[in-house]
Image (cartoon, rainbow, N blue to C red):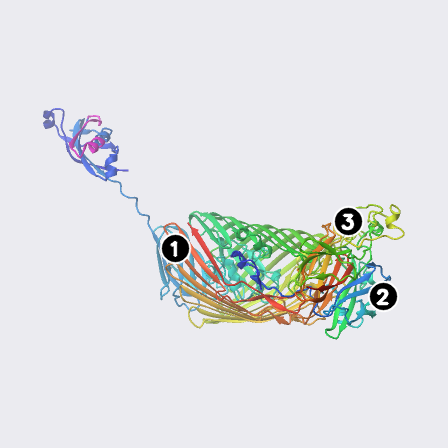
Amino acid sequence: MNRLTFSIIFALAFVAGASQALAQTLTRPPELTRFVEAEYPPSALEEGREASVVLEITIDARGRVSDVNVFESADPEFDAAAIAAARQFEFVPAEFDGVPGPIRIHYKYDFRLPAPPPEPVKASLSGVVRDETTGEPIAGVTVEVEGGGSAVTDEEGRFTIEGLEEGEHVVRLFSPAFGAIQTMESIAAGEQLSVAYELSPPPPFEDEEDGDDMEIVVLAPVIRREVVESRLTAEEARSVPGTGGDVVRVVESLPGVGRSAVGSGQLVVWGASPEDTRVYMDGVPLPRLYHEGGLRSVIHPSFVESIALIPGGAGAAYGRGLGGVILVESRGPTQQGLHGMVGVDLLDATASLGYRDEKGNYQAAAGRFGLLDQFAKVAGDDATELVPIPRFWDGQARVGYRLRDGSTLDVVGIVTGDRYSRGVPNPDPALVTRDFRELDVVRVYARYRRQDEDGTTVEVIPWVGYDRTYRGSSYGSLTTFSEIDAARLGLRSSYGKRVAPWLTLRAGVDIELVFDSHDRSGSIGLPSREGDIRVFGQAPPDTISTDHFSTRQIGVAPYVEGTLSFVDGKLQITPGLRLDPYARSVSRRLPANGRIPEQGAFLEDLAVEPRLIANYEAASWLSLRGSVGRYRRQPLSEDLSAAFGNPTLPTARATQALAGFAVKPVDRVELEVVGFHSRSDHLAMRSPDPTPALASALAATGEGRASGVQGMLRGSIDPGLFGWIAYTYSKAERKNGPDQAYRLFDYDQTHVLTLVAGWTSKFGLELSGRFRYASGMPRTEVIGTYYDAVRDRMQPIFGRHNDIRLPSFVQLDVRAGYSKEFEHQAFMAYLELQNVTNRRNVEEYIYSPDFTERKAIYGLPFLPVLGLQWSF
Amino acid sequence: MRAIPWSSLISLLFVVACVPDFEVDESVVRAPRILAVQASPAESRPGDVVSYRALVADPSGGAAEAEIDWSFCVAVKPLEELGPVSPACVRGDEGALAFLGVGDEVTGAIPFEACSVFGPEPSPTSDGQGGRPVDPDVTGGYRQPVRAGLFTETSGYQVSFFEHRIYCGLVGANQAESLEFRRRYRRNTNPSIDELVIVRADGSEEIVEPGAIPRLSPGEAIELVVRWPDCPTEAVCGDGFCHPDESADTCPDDCAPQQRGCAGAETYLLFSLEGRVFSLNREAIRVSWNANVEGFEEPRTGVESDDLSSESRNRFVAPSFEGRFTTWIVVRDDRGGVGYRAVDWDVVP
């Protein structure tokens, strides 16, 4: 729009004749009542020219424009535009001696170029970050406003971020030494918002639901609900070597986690069986954390916010497992607008796309597809004959809404799939082996979260899911398969409220329903179980059985816990109680028998699981903590087979006790040490009874015990340099029955040491390294042989169960990454060098056919992995 | 070491980057040992009198100066034991073995409780519950373990186990199913080596007669062919085999006064535990090739159950030196039947 100004530079009253002009007096000048804007000449607008035109306008006695002439010209275009506009003017007529009469006036049109739109009024966020306990300012904390810039606190803990738009902003505070948190700030246009964030003493183990390593103290003291929890944000995890860009795989580097055999993808936490460690994504249970082969997690990394590991002593919110708990918190797109990512490396191709509006609502999707089998096709059949090539994919779609009351609602769908097959030919038909595994997982859930200003929290997560598992193998003419179809649904809900300055209550319910059907046929010795005495490659028993059955398992677990705060919040005691009523029906109580009608089994149980957690902040640099609790786990549904297992297996039980301390000797450095002890019983083992009862192939006779100490030293030198040293000493033992002696647990690892260090420059360069040492897992020695004249092979005679170990595992991985941001795009490349020393780590022992010679199967040699990623 | 194909980086990624290979030629007899145990008859009821005969090989090629003690293993194998027999029988624990005798060949009666200890008819447990029956093998059979202890001056005491197929009936079958099984099931017959044929490089074939000592040139490469009787797969009366679909009434020539078996890959009745239906299955045959010299390309070959072939081949390269050597060829069927033959060879220029 051009801007037209006009002014009356003077008015010259006159009448049609000069005599009248001389005879009458102007008593009222004309008054403009209708102004019409002149059209800015296009060429002048393009050329940026401005001008003024003085017009001579004749107004008749009725106030209408009767004539217009140019008095002072600018150029023809401006003149014509001004005249055209002025002809449409209307006036209150001039008066001479009180009588309306014609008049001629001079008008000046000013053609001025349109001014640029006014700059929006920017706001700013400034403030200080202090230690909640000491009041001391904290330097080096990165404060980031999502989509609005960031700043690092100075020595006085102060920061300022300018140029912010008005509206709700996600504010994240991050310190390599302490982790990350986030909160929301509402900023008005032009507001200079000043805030003060008080951080609790920076513990490495925090509230499991806030997703924070530090907490902002607003109204309530920091509530510590877990004694031991290691949490990393996705940003921290991404740069840890060995993950290959898959942030969830950082779990392997956390304290308390044993090293699993390469390719197994199993998680061994504090001496618990892999199936005893539960995996949750936003509170929704997943059957496994890794794809087949253990190379990738099943959760797309684009939407991971944080990963936390509670190796033991979990609060009342968690149950149905005797080991650790892994919590993966997800998020939607973090930036406004449409953004996406495409990446590829040696293992897979990945992509994500998401849109987030200014209110925080979003829609997003991501997918990942393994490329290994594609490479294998290029390599030829040889590559797939002996070497198992896992095929995998996963995807995620999600929408999120920020509701009017500040609460959020996310709806998420997850799919994952795995296919794995291998065949080993042999001229001897008895030695031809084949192996197949398939797993499909679907989860759909909604997550509603609300946090009120008084600290009250509400979370509701209803979910449904479907799992299909197929495992098949053949060893000569012996064929074994197992197929499980499982429909799952559940609800996880919690409500937390600070009911008094000294008491915060939290209650919830954890519901899981599983309806599954099983088809299984083959050897009872496949798959192998913990406690089996065997060697790698040993043929399974060639006797077979079969079963087709279904189960319904219902668990409805209400829980409540309250945190009592004493001594100004320095002493917190959190008693909790989880009730886990459990009901199960199995379609077959006894193996199929043509003479007996089929009958089912029903079992119900009420597990009372008390928990107690205590934390004491003895000083600003020292905290003490401890916990004790009872835990239960329902039997695995595949163990409820009347032919292969036992439909009446009870729940397995465990008692865990932890005690430890955390010290912060200097700023940005923290050491935490925790000792643990657990005892478990009612573990399902193969029946040691030489004459077991019908439908009692498994018996709940197993017992376990594990003790150890875990230490973690974590710190940072400046905001770009971080690292940790995690060490766990443990001894885990099992016994198969009450009359048997304790022996080492199959996954026992006495020493597990992990060193991680990383550096991030301001210029997008990342360098990091990881060193791992782990004791070898126990194995049972072969001390002799006998000849099996039916199968024409030697059979091993074993020594004491788990009396020898594989050699220790030592590996060094390094990673270099570089990211470059352009105007609306970013490019990232990384090179991971795994096992840079090319150490030959023994993964398994293998024996010659006559068992007179033992050799080793080695793990991955030096392996470079290059990854590329482009995002917009 | 045998490297897994390194034709792509993919091979680097997986479970085993390098699987070791053992330079063990399983076909070579390096010490006196039992190579096979043959039961006669191949399948028996509890209480039946049976004989066991061992094929003992000696690196010298002749008959081994060996002493074998025989026992029935009577200890139940617990489910936690993944080997074929109870560890108590391997150790020779007191009460775990029922002594049979000493010698190359012994005779004894199958224990009467064999079908309850090793079969589908378990005794009640101590607290009166029904016991868990032993699972059948893939051919639907059950086995009585037999322990053979071989003592030699050079190798000391070595334990071998043979599992004798016992005729016990079906687990979990109703009366009609049991009746049909008893009517149609044919007990196993030991396989035999009908022909051993030498195929020389020029394609000529030479049958090795029993007791003959064939000659080979030093380093001569031949193909050895083992042939066994071709067993009928269809019920054809008068073919010399009592097929499951024949009976003494419908085909007395094949099934009366006793059911005639076939010393090859027999067709037998199999009861499907899952579908509770009967089906006809065919035995697979495995051939073990042993010698007191190196030379066999494969230690074992065979034909699978869906392969109608009645022969198996293996390549052999004669020693490069003159002299005599011995081969022992053993054929085994799926149901535990065994046949064997020892052949001496002369290597002459």
Subunit that carries the residue with mark 3: B
Looking at numbered disc 3 in the image, what kind of residue is underneath it? Answer: Leu
Q: Calculate the distance from the C-alpha at mark 2 to the C-alpha at mark 1.
A: 85 Å
Residue A75 sits inside the magenta stretch:
yes
Can you tell which of label 2 and label 1 is closer to the viewer?
2
**Marks 3/1 same chain:** no
Residue A382 sits inside the magenta stretch:
no
Q: Which residue is mark 1?
A: A820
Subunit that carries the residue with mark 1: A
Q: Which residue is mark 3?
A: B280
Can you tell which of label 3 and label 1 is closer to the viewer?
3
Subunit that carries the residue with mark 2: B
> Would residue A778 appear left or right of B45 to someone viewing this image?
left
Helix, strand or loop status at disc 1: strand
Residues at badges 2 and 1 in contact (C-beta under 8 Å)? no
Graded by Cα atoms within 10 Å as few (under 14), some (14 to 19) or many (20 or more), the crowding at tag 3 reads some
Relative image position of residue A66 (x, y in whole percent): 20, 25
Image mark for residue B107:
2
